Amino acid sequence: MKYYSEETINATLPECTVYELLWKNNRNNLDDTALIYFDSKISYRRLFEQIEQAARALLEFGVTAGRVVTVITTSCVNSIVLFYAINRIGAISNYINVLASAEEFEKYFREAESGYIFSLDLFADKALAAIKNIGHGKLCVFSLKNYMPFVASSIYSLKYGKKQFEQGENIIYWKEFMSQGKHDVELPAFHDCHTVSIYAHTTGTTGFPKTVLHTDFAYNAVASQYETSFPHERGEIFLNIMVPFVTYGMLTCMHMPLCLGLTLVVIPKYDYANLAGYIRKYHANHIMGIPSYFIQMLNDPKIKKMDLSCIYTLGAGGEGFTEKVERTCNVFLAEHGSKANVLTGYGLTEACSSVISGLYNHNKVGSVGVPLVKNNVRVWDNEANCECSYDEEGEVQLYSPSLMIGYMGHQDEQKNMLVHDEDGKVWIKTGDIGRVDSDGFLYIVGRIKRFLLICPNGMAYKILPKPIEEAIAEDRAVAQVCVVSAHNDNGTGSEPRAFVVLNEGEDTTATEARLRQLCTDKLPDYMRPFEYVFLDSMPKNAVGKMDIKRLENWDSRV
């Protein structure tokens, strides 16, 4: 806790809803710009007007406190307005993966018992099919162009046309929906901030995503923690490039910056090729994403020519940088005028995505940071059933006021993940292997569930992929690397297989020869990859993370 003042440590967390915190933190600056969307500026005053109009429209639509409203969308003004409007009337928001199939939509709807669906028109066909299969439900369809300025809206219509759905008793468009909010409808009192108000979803690496139950208090705790550890001034530009159906996108990249009075640039679909244009056009001060969003920056000819002094924060969570790439990014930023260093972070959906973070004046390359104020981390020896000492490796466990209430319908898994200590504190087992140094910095070594089971010559070993990946990443030609286990060519068992993305212009044959020698010099024989697969880019899953499952199922014959 040496990184925080006594005042910060002893400060109370907000006891209010997410809507209330947004209002309290901005009510004296309503004419400041809240959102920039296709060059259209929306003030905080206008944002609150739209939220309250949508809240009244929800009531007219039949939504009441405690009901679940499912939203299917990328980032846009509608998604922000709906999030706070749903919360304003005490309903539960349920943002789901837009890339799911109609069958998966149906499963989401049924599990949440959600009869009120709001869908971006791009995904409304699937939503409608799911509703028809269930036999009941109401659908509101909206478009990315609803809040675009006239010129952008006209261009969008010419390019994509207008998706038409047969309107009826159970289907309505955004314009008609919002018109119902003009009626004189009294909004309800604010609900208890400790009740469940937000459904989040895990990434589904072990099956269909689990539904995680969150409260307003948990969300606001994270926003409050960043307020005290994240240097900022009102009106600074925050580039929102994450999707809203992951907690990191909804909370750390939307609710938090808005509660800090920043101006949010809303990007419906992030395209790395446009990053230089985003920075130049908006003079972005704060950018948070995942490492794969930023790694290509190092080779972008447009960004190489830019002054990046406007960037104060470059935050990366979700999947780790190698130390080599993190150092390279820091040097790149400095050479282009930015005083920022990459700030890595760590968390999980079950703890509102952000628990650990690098701090501006306290950061160590290779670590994922220190606990945000009021959070804690410990490393646990599961065999000895005791806490590890500094620099000893074990399972990472987290304590945080932003911890989930639990899972929906997965009580056994919930019981296995949550641990009560002798003081009554609840810790969550992350399934990650890590260590904490004497300064309190956390280092992630690997995942318990991502041990590589290798069987060279019939002898089974469990190894972590990270030491292999770190060795390979030392080569100057390597941009990204991921190591999985795979059956070798001679049928004698499973061995490590390395997937590698090279920097532009590098030769695969020469690089492979160097990598094989590098691994021979640095690794025992059972940890050396039997095969190197060179890719143009790493495959990504629905939320933009490296798709390790796809790499594990890779067929070299294809």
Image (cartoon, grey):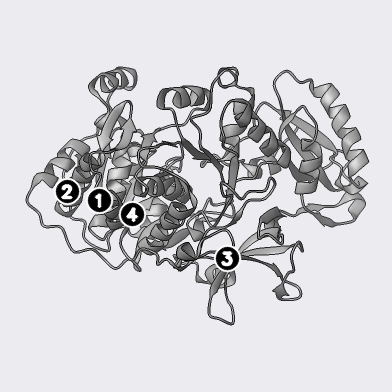
- Does residue 419 sit above or below 267 in this rendering? below
Task: State the SS at label 1.
Answer: helix
> Which element type, helix, strand or loop, lies under badge 2?
helix
Which residue type carries mark 3?
A: Asn
Whole-angstrom CA distance, mark 2 to mark 3, is 42 Å
**Vertical position of residue 181 compared to residue 113: above or below:** above
**Residue 60 percent across, percent down from the top left:** 14, 52
- Mark 4 is on which residue type? Ser
Q: Residue at x 50, y 33 (%)?
A: 311
Earlier residue among tags 2 and 3:
2
Instruction: Answer left or right for 322 relative to 399.
Output: right
Q: Residue furthest bottom?
A: 422
Mark in the foreground, 2 or 3: 3
**221 on left or right of 31:** right
Residue 516: quarter of image: top right
Q: Amino acid at mark 2?
A: Ala
Q: Are marks 1 and 2 in contact (CB under 8 Å)?
A: yes
Give me the residue at 26% from left, 35% from top. 42
Amino acid carrying mark 1 in the image: Ala
Which element carries disc 3, helix, strand or loop? strand
Check disc 4 and report the residue beneath it: 93
Q: Is residue 164 above or below residue 447?
A: above
Q: Nearer the viewer, mark 3 or mark 1?
A: 3
Q: What label does residue 135 carry, if any?
A: none
Q: Quadrant of the N terminus?
A: bottom right
* Residue 45 position within the rendered picture, expressed as x and y whole percent measured from the top left: 21, 42
Name the residue nearer the viewer: 409 or 237.
237
For disc 2, the marked residue is 57
Disc 4 + disc 2, Cβ < 8 Å: no
Residue in view at x 45 percent, y 59 percent: 211
Is the C-beta separation of discs 2 and 3 under 8 Å? no
